[in-house]
Amino acid sequence: MSELTTSTSDRATLLRFLGRLGQAELNAGNAVPLVERDLATIAKVNGEPQVQVFVLPTVLFLKWENGEEHQVDMAHGAYRTPSLRFDQIEEVMTIARAARRGELSPKRGLARIETMWRTPHFYGDGGFVAGYLLTTLGVAMMLRPSWNGMLLTALMAFFCALVLVAARRRPSLSVMLPVVVSFLLAAAVSLGYRYGLKEPAFTLLIPPLITFLPGMTLTVSVIELAYNSIISGASRMVAGFTRLTLLAFGILGGFKVFESGAWHLAQSMEERIPYYWPWVGVLVFTFGLHIYQSSKRRSFTFMLITAAMAYLGQNLSGLFIHGASTAFFGAALMTITALVIEFRFKGPPAIVTFLPGFWLLAPGSFGLVSLASMASGTDTGAQVMTLLFSLSGIATGCLIGAFTYTMLLHPRKTGSLWKPEEI
């Protein structure tokens, strides 16, 4: 028996539910067109087909029209609330899916959303630090530094984790964290070059800064632009580039503290960990992210499968082509895998299993290296094209993967064709 509202007159509860759900979806990083689809579909299921929904990355507007009656609500978006962890993102998307199908009433939906916001980190501060450390080491393994580079990366990751734990309860510090942390880490690396360090600078810096990189934001912005959501896509892209600029500013400032040109020259490594370690890195990275982001236990296996498929697609395509375009194939394979897991195997929502793959494809790290190189005057034109091409490739790969899944693999009910609003 569906839990639909028994009376369409209870619009206040429905309005409040849609506002809170939209806010949570925006905070989870869902694309604006998909948030608008969810809210409009839920309103229709609950007897309000005349709803008008307008969503931006930081705010949403809801308007009802029924004769001369109008109701307007504005719910502040993600900038006033902390980032959601993976377990919270999964709960938000599960609530949205149940509400779209008419299986969850607005009243119960509101209660579940409020419970979601109060859910503590499953592994506590200790798990937060350990997960961040493992996540960083996993990324470092995929870049194959020397063993000394791995040790230095682990020390920097431990420092980052402690800073994040201290700042987690004070959201006002989040704006300055990228500059402060990147400055301190770059200063430490620059000082190391004075004492014989020979590792490439960004091989050391990208792993501990991986969670500061706005790869997901930049990729979603390109997807929104592809959906013709120009305002939201452009604003997300500006926000992503601003975060990259802050990181690049901090890194260049840190190098200037202990002025040394060695970081420009250290572009190769004399000794590297064995070639098979990057695949171990995928496992370590995903497990670390599972702990760090407090994802549900059943989600780890699915996250690992999706991340492995993203890495496999990128590496296999790299045998035939070179450069940032390999990310297209990794993104397409990752998207198909995540959607199959959600709809064929009743696994976690696709956005949860997507996220590790986004960091593996690393549009954010492409951007960080590009902006730092531009600021230092190194091959500016090529860096701009690399950044834009990698972003477009990942976003296009996601869209092509979703289209391929929809046309060939999505389960269809007998006697009816699948409709886009079902996903």
Image (cartoon, rainbow, N blue to C red):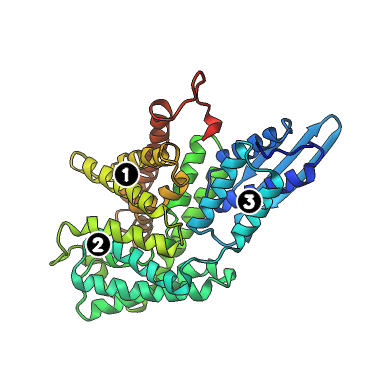
Looking at the rendered structure, the secondary structure element under dot 1 is helix
Secondary element under disc 3, as helix, strand or loop, is helix
User: Where on the picture, by quarter, is residue 171?
Assistant: bottom right
Q: Which mark is residue 398?
A: none
The residue sitting at the bottom extreme is: 195
Find residue 327 and name its label: 1
In the image, what residue type sits under mark 3?
Gln
Q: Position of residue 422 (x, y in %)?
A: 54, 32
Where does the image place residue 109, in percent across and percent down from the top left?
66, 48
Three-letter amino acid code of the residue under disc 2: Met
- CA distance separating discs 2 and 3: 36 Å
Residue farthest along the right direction in this orientation = 68
Say which quadrant the N terminus sits in: top right
Tell me which amino acid carries mark 1. Answer: Ala
Q: Is residue 178 above or below residue 374?
A: below
Image point 35% across, 52% down: which residue? 301
Q: Residues within 10 Å of mark 1 (few under 14, many from 20)?
A: many
Looking at the image, is mark 1 or mark 3 earlier in the sequence? 3
Occupied quadrant, residue 279: bottom left
- Tell me the residue at 29%/49% (across/down): 308
C-alpha gap between disc 2 and disc 1: 19 Å
The residue sitting at the left extreme is 270
Name the mark on residue 141: 2
Q: Examine the rendering and report whether any part of residue 381 can be seen.
A: no
Q: Which residue is mark 3?
A: 23
In the drawing, does residue 103 fall left or right of residue 295?
A: right
* SS class, disc 2: helix
Closest to the camera, between mark 2 and mark 1, is: 2
Task: Please give left or right for residue 273 compared with residue 131 in the image.
Answer: left
- Label 2 neighbourhood size at 10 Å, few (<14), some (14-19), many (20+)? many
